Image (cartoon, rainbow, N blue to C red):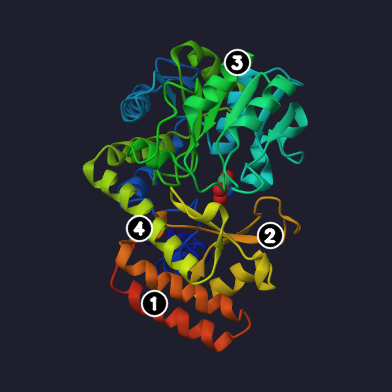
Amino acid sequence: MSALLNTDPEIANAIYQEESRQSTVLEMIASENYASKAVLEAVGSVLTNKYSEGYPGARYYNGNYVVDEVERLARSRAKDLFGADHANLQPHSGAQANLAAYLALLNPGDTVMGLKLDSGGHLTHGSPVNASGKIYNFVSYEVDKESHLVDYESMLAQAKNTRPKLIIVGATAYPRVWDFERARHIANEIGAVLLADIAHISGLVAAKVHPTPVGHAQVITSSTHKTLRGPRGGIILCDEDYRKRINSGVFPGTQGGPMMHVIAGKAVMLKEANTTEFKNYAQQVVLNAKHLATHLIDGGFNLVTGGTDNHLLLLDIRDRGITGREAANALEKAGIVCNFNSVPFDDRPVREGGGIRLGTPAITSRGLKTEHMSLVANWITRALHDVNNEDELKVISQEITTLLNEFATPGIA
Ligand code: DSN
């Protein structure tokens, strides 16, 4: 970074500081990961200089023969990895992918059904403060009050009752497997289109450790930086019948020029994700999450749904006399970074949260295995035993640094 250090030492130093932070904490935000050095190099390349509104072979600017190849490669790798008819790599994020898909499939005011926010749904699935909730008439389905599993019977009843044009399956805080086939049957019953937002689980789907929505959902959206371990961005997969509409929904519908440097990073990620090494990684992500869940349950924690099938755990801590925010802040002091989160049927304000969400994608990229999960559970238990015990939080953070010194940080060192 010598050029950056000369030109702008403040920003260069901020990047060094962030590299150090990412290397010295247990990164357990379920939606974060470590992109590889190869991905980072692609994103930091001269492709950022190119304007390429349009699609390969049909651009609005000249000089695109190189980036056309980059985007074609990314597209064909995505189709191959997921077995989809079509892939659009241009969405700047998962939220942009959803907005573009809505524009492609709906008219303003149309009814759409998504998972309720405190059941694990995402802001872009109809929150009143998001464009989705302002432009479309969102109705929601919930998880079951007892099991906290998605209740497909009530999804069907709600679908028949409200007749949405689009049904969205997918979540930001749901620790179990989705039944995409069943959701498609429900959509078919009322003539709705099914959209699967697999932002959290796309890496697990790519590695076949979670069932695929391909063949069930006509349109699939995702971000590219979570379990997929790529650069920050979005992707849309769809059936051939939806190709033109989806492409128009992205450009010119909701975006201008694509970020070709990021699309190059996505292409690299898609190559990396189509390897045995990545499949092993994704399996380990789930194994680590399951082991961590078992240790935390043994330690007396209340896990939403009683465990996990994927990369994330949702701890309901309402019985511990602290808020999710207080828990997440104490964990950060102890060197464990996660986020506070609502839990199903939460009686706490969203800004406080009745729980915390923990994920294993980044710590698995770092190299932690099942045998380390009892240590992680023990650190979490000790930190949350007394969130005001600063001395204990410091001791935990030192123990974590000692363990992490044994592991390189992907993309950094
Ligand atoms: N912010 C992402 C997450 O943490 O799940 C979703 O957009």
Q: Are marks 3 and 1 in contact (CB under 8 Å)?
A: no
Q: Amino acid at mark 3?
A: Glu
| Label 2 environment density (alpha carbons within 10 Å; few <14, some 14–19, many ≥20) | many
| Label 4 environment density (alpha carbons within 10 Å; few <14, some 14–19, many ≥20) | many
Query: Can residue 14 be seen in the rendering of this structure?
Result: yes
Q: Are marks 1 and 4 in contact (CB under 8 Å)?
A: no
| Between discs 1 and 2, the one toward the N terminus | 2
**Is residue 290 positioned above or below 261 on the image?**
below
| Label 3 environment density (alpha carbons within 10 Å; few <14, some 14–19, many ≥20) | few
- Please name the residue shown 33% across and 24% down the image: 76
User: What secondary structure is marked by label 3?
Assistant: helix
Rounded to the nearest angstrom, the CA distance separating label 4 from label 2 is 26 Å
- Of residues 190 and 167, the one drawn nearer to the viewer in this rendering: 190
187 relative to 132 in the view: left or right = left
Rounded to the nearest angstrom, the CA distance separating label 1 from label 2 is 28 Å
| Between discs 4 and 2, the one toward the N terminus | 2
User: What secondary structure is marked by label 1?
Assistant: helix
- Please name the residue shown 40% across and 31% down the image: 212
Residue placed farthest to the left in the image?
276
- The residue to which callout 4 is attached is 364
Q: Amino acid at mark 4?
A: Thr
- Please name the residue shown 65% across and 64% down the image: 324
Residue 127: name its quadrant. top right
- The residue to which callout 2 is attached is 353
| Between discs 3 and 4, the one toward the N terminus | 3
Rounded to the nearest angstrom, the CA distance separating label 1 from label 4 is 16 Å
Query: Can residue 46 be seen in the rendering of this structure?
Result: no
- Of residues 310 and 124, the one drawn nearer to the viewer in this rendering: 310
User: What secondary structure is marked by label 4?
Assistant: helix
